[in-house]
Image (cartoon, grey):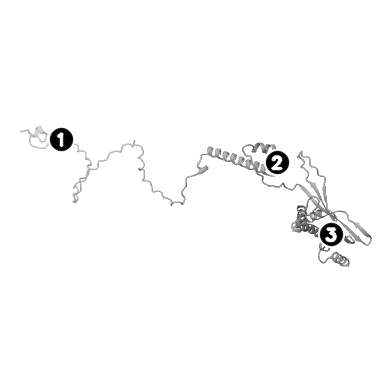
Amino acid sequence: MDSYDDRGVGGGHGRVAGPDSGAVPEPRTEPDPEPRTRLDPEPRTGIDPEPEPHAEPDVRTDPEPRTDPDPDPDPDPEPEPQHQPERGVGRAEPRAGMAGLSFPYQVVAAVALSVIGLVTCVQLAMVFLHVAPSNTLTKQHGKGIDEWVYPEFEQNWKLFAPNPLQQNIAVHVRAEIAGADGRRTTPWMNLSGEDGKAIRGNPLPSHVQQNELRRGWDFYLGSHDSQNRANGLRGTLSEQYIRRIVMLRLGEHDYGGTVERIQVRSEVRSVAAPPWSTEKISTKPSYRVLPWWTVAAADLPEGSADQKETDQKETDQ
């Protein structure tokens, strides 16, 4: 058996060697505790495990400096559900037509539509001037209009069958007056000129001033030939109508006697050409003179003094 001396525990007398014994005790070494690793907990069986009786020793070590980069940001959050607008409210509809094209194509489309619209307007204007009666535009630009129309767009109809009136027609009258100093003839009086003076400056001219004399004279020309012979009953009626109009106008003037006879004529003047036109148009007047008419009671306005005198003469005869 080993002795206590060999083991350095005690001397020969069985005493434990102390610090004064001169023996150096061997350092006491303890095995390092095994590092505790954290394992996943065992599945729970419904019974909580009993707490350990002794707490683990708190072994603190200096923390190492952090060399890891900043922690990753939070994982991408779940996308929030977007609010779905109601159908037809606040919903952008797809663009259609020119709005759906890119800007260069919009420019091209706008230019093309402008050219088409311009050509269409020119075409309509040229055809209108081609079928319209002769006027200042067709006389000045007739060659260009024909070059545009012929041969592709030739038209065989006219917009207006008769030509517009390009003449100034005035109706004149003169009368034979029987007075105290004998018979005398008045100068020609322009009845159409008097109507024109009444119309100028009048915002609301009467129908009589505008149309009575003009329509009456047209009625007479349409019912008589060039020799002033009546064409049937309408000719006689138109002559009576002209007589009454003339006597009504003469009644507005005092000639100092009784109107025994009247004579009517028309003055026709062609409208002068515009200054830029090279057309030569004669503006000299031409006259159509009617024969003298003896005034009868039927030609006078009702209730006038002249009518009474005429009725008395016819009774005496």
**Vertical position of residue 4 compared to residue 286: above or below:** above
Residue 38 x/y as whole percent = 23, 42
Q: Nearer the viewer, mark 1 or mark 3?
A: 3
Q: Nearer the viewer, mark 3 or mark 2?
A: 3
Residue 250 x/y as whole percent = 84, 59
Quarter of the image where the C terminus is located: bottom right
For disc 1, the neighbor class at 10 Å (few under 14, some 14 to 19, many from 20) is few
- Residue pictured at 53% horizontal, 38% vertical: 105
Q: Secondary structure at mark 2?
A: helix
Q: Secondary structure at mark 1?
A: helix
What amino acid is labelled 3 in the image? Leu
Which residue position holds label 3? Answer: 250
Of label 2 and label 1, which has the lower sequence position? 1
Which residue position holds label 1? Answer: 20
Which residue position holds label 2? Answer: 138
What amino acid is labelled 2 in the image? Thr
Residue placed most toward the observer, 58 or 20: 58
What amino acid is labelled 1 in the image? Asp
